[in-house]
Amino acid sequence: METAATHPVSHAHGQLAHGHGHEHGHLKLHYQPALPISNGKLMMWLFLSTEIMFFAGLIAVYIVLRFGALTWPSQSAVHLEERIGFINTFVLICSSVTVVLSLEACRSHNPAMAKMWLAATLALGGVFLAIKAYEYNQKFSHGIYPRYPRSQIYERPDLEYGSAVRVRAQELLVPLQTAGYDKPLSAAQTRRLKRLEAAAQRSPQEEQAYRRLRARREGYERFRFLQDLKTRASSTQPDVLAALAAEIMPIRPRGSHEHLEGLNDLNPWLKMPIVIPGGNMWASTYFTLTGFHALHVLVGLIVFAIMMPMRFTPDRANMIENIGLYWHFVDIVWIFLFPLLYLF
Amino acid sequence: MSDHAVAHGTGHGGASHAHGGLGKYLAVFVALCGLSTASFFTTSQHWPYHDQPSVGWAFMMAVSCTKALLVVLFFMHVKYEANWKYVLTIPASLMALFLGLALVPDIGMRVRGGFNYGYSEERYRHAAQASDTLALEQASRRVGAHSKGANSESLHSEGAHGEGAHGARGNAASGGQGH
């Protein structure tokens, strides 16, 4: 820092001397930047300061929405697993360490080692995104999307929800009726099915008949099951509708650690509308925050991938340092997102 | 720390500082892992403040700030940078803070903002309430108790496989083949 103070003076001197036409062969003029850092690093820090505001805005919106809401879903209600978030935190911390080690290796004239650590960072970033993709997929399979019409989330078990369940049940009932599964097997057919089931060996014709009868029996079971759901969804009683919603997708009471499975989990084809109070706002904030963060991870990975073929001689250290700064920033964002989304 | 003085003395573009030391990075790494585990600990049964969630929230935010500080100071080398670091980080952080505070009146108080300010009566009536969550949790508890005992026979009944979960799954699979 002393140099930063003393250099400009000596420069002024030098220029002054030069202007007067004196020859000072020993005096070397060189450009003194306004800040004692490279342009690339300055740009990266300016960019990061805008990124601070970008993510602070998003995180603040989440906090403010969440604590201003009338009710907010618990982690288990939205199928969020704290463990997975914790693993991802660990993965990202490791990747921050590897990028720092890559920089150190590059500075100490060890290009091969630098490349190795950078490859490790790339791999860890990939693991992070893969885990994130798995989590997104888990949400989607439970009907949790950030917006309608894909989102199956209803805010409360009210008449609107009941009618949505009826519509979905009807959607599933129509093909069953068309296929003729709305009538039970006759007594003779039931007997035949029992006989075929018990048979040790079946001829091709028998096998065909067996399959047809079995499909009819199961189709009828499904038909009755859906009819029953439809009847219950037609109720105007709040407690009947709440019980129906809880059966379709139970919400684990706070403090309990029991694993509950609903009809949607047991029958993946069912895809009934679900009730998660506050779930729509939750989905909006969750996908916005983690989506923008994942996008930043992806951009980092693209830059790492572009850098991979390079030879990391010490003059490339600035480059690794700058992308490293970005990568650490992405890590810091996750450090805040993890407790806010998974543990609050 | 005697080596920074030397590094700053050479001060070309600030890029060639050598503050590393594997040991220091390893220590920071271990600290970060430990702090993450400390945050995660708030979900465990041994965390004593489950009835006062705000204690856990404050704890987790303190831990997160510490972690962020460790990353910024050591991994981003900010500890060893010249004074420009304040110029680039402090204004941005302050603006970020104001940005968050500016959201409170409009968005934070959008529901219960008081007279003529929060949700309209109609919107309030259709919004999910804490009572909805409670009702669903209670109903779910009953569902859980049911599925433990006699299986909910009215729904996936008379299956030859008929053992609740597996029966229904079997139905779905074989039904698909049947078509």
Image: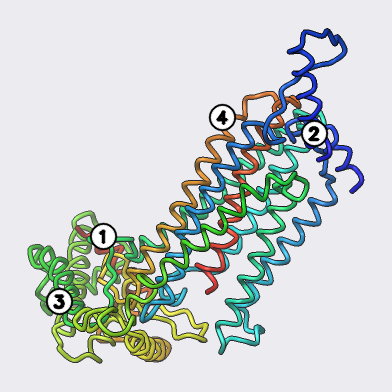
Read off the chain for label 4. A
Q: Are marks 3 and 1 on the same chain?
A: yes
Is residue A190 in view?
Answer: no
Q: CA distance from mark 4 to mark 2?
A: 29 Å
Read off the chain for label 3. A
Label drawn at residue A150: 1
x then y, percent, for residue B135: 33, 89
Residue in the picture at 69% in, 30% down = A33
What's the amino acid at mark 3?
Ser
Residue in the picture at 47% in, 65% down = B100
> Around disc 3, counting alpha carbons within 10 Å, would you say few (fewer than 14), some (14 to 19), or many (20 or more)?
some
Location of residue B33 with respect to A247 vertically, above or below = above
The quarter of the picture where the N terminus of chain A appears is: top right
Query: Dots 2 and 3: beta carbons under 8 Å?
Result: no
**Helix, strand or loop at disc 1?**
loop
Disc on the earlier residue, 1 or 4: 1
Disc on the earlier residue, 3 or 4: 3
Disc on the earlier residue, 3 or 1: 1
Q: CA distance from mark 3 to mark 4?
A: 53 Å
Is residue A164 in view?
Answer: yes
- Judging by the rendered image, the residue that carries numbered circle 4 is A306
